[in-house]
Image: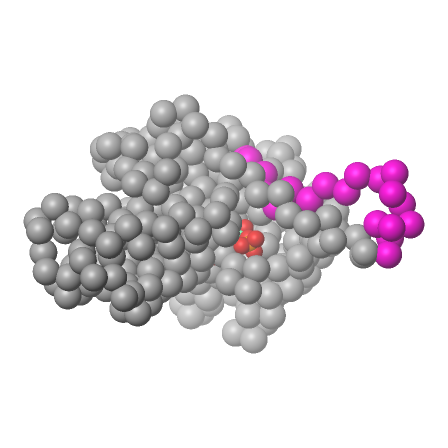
Amino acid sequence: MEIRGAGRIARAATEALKEGAIRSQARSPAQLVAELTRYGLKLREARPTAVSLANAVNFVLVGANRGLGRRPKLEALRKLVVSLCDDFIANSMNAVNVIAEIGAKRIVSGDVVLTHCNSEAVTQILLAAKAQNKEFQVVVTETRPRYQGRLTATILAKNGVDVSLIPDSACRLYMHEVDRVIVGADAIASNGAVVNKIGTSTIAVVAHETRTRFYVAAETYKLSPRTLLGELVEIEERSPLEVVGERWMKENPGVKVKNPAFDVTPPEYIDLIITERGVFPPQGIVFLMKELYPEPIVTIVE
Ligand code: RUB
């Protein structure tokens, strides 16, 4: 949890693979790829819901395996891995910037925008809209139990955005004042369902009730190609100690404390998915997925 947000997690994984390649003591190209595959597996376990992480690891390992097939010298393969990692990071940063530009067009002066958790893609949209001198208000949910909403509120306030922090449970009370909800994503399934921080789907239902527009901002490496094959996205279950203290747990041994970190918002509750490849209705995301991942079983790291 020192590195949060699906985009940052993916970039951190490629940084780690790059460092692994540079430091590796492998004596042959095959050994180097085997070593990186082990690291990739370990990295992927860190945050199972963030599909961006698996996609980043796969991008590097698929490229490394293709390179290996060309029978390179060890140093050439190491260089290839480093450049694959650099490419992923550069593309990821560029994707966030393009999303900010596209997303900012959707915000108009006078808007009240609600967001949940701490998404870089969403924050950049809001900051881009602010840089265009649009005047709008943002309502941020606290995002229990880790309070990532506070991070979002701090960043926005520091940049001069009119921002209010509310308890998650107050979202229905405020929704009638909200013009659009914008959230990020950890994973997007082939049917357009979006996996994001726990509480997102509740906000979507409430937005649906009040006919408030509900947008998702996500780089295309959040698309889960495995869902094209009917696989489900795993939901990370985190420690109960993020919800209650150790003492409380001991005093209440009969209480099971649950802490799912993410939930799934069905496509019917989503109006638009904003990506660096443009905007899509959730039902259209499958076409983009098929174009970007023509072979869904790209998982070298199984
Ligand atoms: C963060 C979270 C964010 C998405 C998208 O959860 O749910 O909304 O990851 O973020 P956590 P981004 O704090 O548990 O990682 O747009 O930055 O990729």
Q: Is residue 266 magenta?
A: no
- Dividing the image into 4 quarters, which one contains the C terminus? top left
Residue drawn where x is 20% and y is 51% of the image: 30
Residue 185 as seen in the image, left or right of residue 150: left
- Please identify the residue farthest to the front as the structure is shown: 27
Find the magenta span and give its range: 247-265
- Dividing the image into 4 quarters, which one contains the N terminus? bottom right
Q: Position of residue 176 (x, y in %)?
A: 67, 44
Determine whether 256 is above or below 20 in the image: above
Residue 210 as seen in the image, left or right of residue 65: right
Q: Position of residue 144 (x, y in %)?
A: 69, 53
Residue drawn where x is 50% and y is 52% of the image: 46
Residue 190 in which image quadrant: top left
Q: Position of residue 29 (x, y in %)?
A: 18, 56
Residue 62 as seen in the image, left or right of residue 282: left
Q: Position of residue 44 (x, y in %)?
A: 43, 48
Q: Observer-nearest residue: 236 or 72?
A: 72
Residue 163 in which image quadrant: bottom right
Q: Observer-nearest residue: 10 or 196?
A: 10
Determine whether 156 is above or below 96 in the image: below
What is the number of callouts on the image? Answer: 0
